[in-house]
Image (spheres, rainbow, N blue to C red):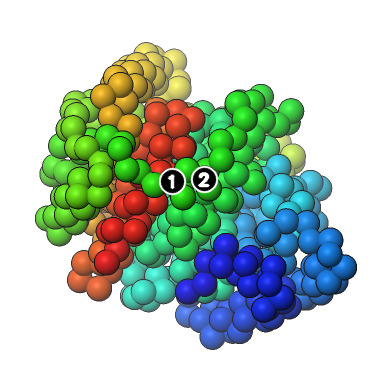
Amino acid sequence: METLLEAALRLGRGETSSQELVRASLDRVAEREEELHAFLTLLPESAIEEAQASDRRRAAGQAMSVFDGIPWSAKDNLLTEGVRTTAASRILGDYLPPYSATAVGRIEAQGAVLLGKTNLDEFAMGSSTEYSAFGPSRNPVDPTRVPGGSSGGSAVAVAAGMCHFALGSETGGSVRQPAAFCGVVGVKPSYGRVSRYGLIAFASSLDQIGTLTRDVRDAAALLGVIAGGDPMDQTASTAPAQDYLAAAREGGKGLTFGVPPEYLGEGVAPEVRAEVERAAGLLERHGLTRRDVSLPHTPYALDAYYIIAPAEASSNLARFDGMRYGPRADAQDLAEAYRRSRGQGFGPEVKRRILLGTYVLSAGYYDTYYLQAQRLRTLLRDEFLQAFRDVDVLLTPTTPTTAFRLGENTQDPLAMYMADTLTIPANLAGLPAISVPGRPVGGLPVGLQLMAAPLREDLMFRVAATLEEVAAR
Ligand code: GLN
């Protein structure tokens, strides 16, 4: 399938037009959307109009960038001015944002054409899109299986050829995990690398916007567009973005990588483990040095995450109360109005997180749970920083297994949470991480994950480019 940069090249040479690209995308949507349900909102009319405008700009020699005219889509928890944004929740079912997320605005300023808003687990809480209030998406490789989540719709749209790239968001793996399940490239930048302004908050100390693309170079080019400081987000790093594309072109030769044994242990399918070992061997053969490191606190990451993320969610979601946001339910008094608006507006997983979060923050439990989880988070981060003194990147599987079947984990929240064990540590530590497709096992995509030190996306992209070149064959 054509990559974003390949399409850009053809546009630049006059071999195709934005209208042609957008029409091809819409044809693909017409063929597969009914089965796959990647989108919550489709924008065919405005997309065609924007494509016409793009073609006119280009004909006049005024293309805004290489992205000008290329179809893309955004996860539906990213605000898009005047375009319905639901976070896949009934409570925001008809919400029209008054402004766009910074990352969305930066892509629009390049001239790319927004095709639609993609499906997700409600408020990005989940790993399969099955918790969307509007029905699940399906994996394009095998529609009996989930695409992963929560950015499942974005991964499906890119994997099924419905658009050339997409934005997603991560709190604990929501870009990398669906990328791994659908066979595309997913990047979670360092915490603070991309502004969170206009991303509907789940857990603010973890949330980060990420990219879904067909290859590593596309991801590098796209991150270059959205990275950078923002006066609207005080946590956005003002460190200048590196030339990620140049890093991807350079490749990983001469760098060092480690495979932490804690990421290959219990729960990781033997075929997935074997694929990581195969990839490690290939990297060594292509000029990288392997030096294994140990990260002994890894097994506690999942527990810490499922305290910290719900704690922050319980506070962030307080604004969805039928007064400030969301439809107000009929009620006799204020307390009942809150109760009923929230009771009707939120799905079961969101309620579970709010309850969990409220519990771990409550007097008497705060020290036992929340404080303890924060301590673990610090240990985990220190341990990573220590490891990155010895190696440039870490290589692990992205997920313990390949895509599971629809319905397989919905009755068992713990089993669903396990899908994120290998992605969550990078979120807790604020590291950049990428999932690159390996060689499929049993006909299903496998993701190989690379993590690097905070703001060392350059090293991550260098090794990822080599990994992509050698691993998928
Ligand atoms: N699956 C994880 C959760 O449900 C991560 C979600 C995410 O990264 N947004 O919390």
Q: Position of residue 229 (x, y in %)?
A: 67, 30
Q: Residue 167: which quarter of the image?
A: bottom right
Q: Residues within 10 Å of mark 1 (few under 14, many from 20)?
A: some
| Kind of element beneath mark 2 | helix
Q: Is mark 2 within 8 Å of ligand 1?
A: no
Q: Alpha-carbon neighbours of circle 2 within 10 Å: few (<14), some, or many (≥20)?
A: some
**Eyeballing the image, is 260 above or below 169?**
above
Residue 298 or residue 365, whichever sits in front: 298
Q: Nearer the viewer, residue 300 or 3?
A: 3
Q: Which residue is depicted at the point 63% across and 65% down?
A: 8
Q: Which residue is mark 1?
A: 250
Looking at the figure, which quarter contains the C terminus?
A: bottom left
Question: Would residue 58 be visible to someone looking at this image?
Answer: yes
Residue at image location 74% in from the left, 39% down from the top: 324
Query: Residue 273: horizontal and vertical position, in percent?
Result: 16, 51
The Cα–Cα distance between marks 2 and 1, rounded to whole angstroms, is 6 Å
Q: Which residue is mark 2?
A: 246
Residue 452, placed above or below residue 344: above
Q: Quadrant of residue 471?
A: bottom left
Q: Residue furthest right?
A: 60
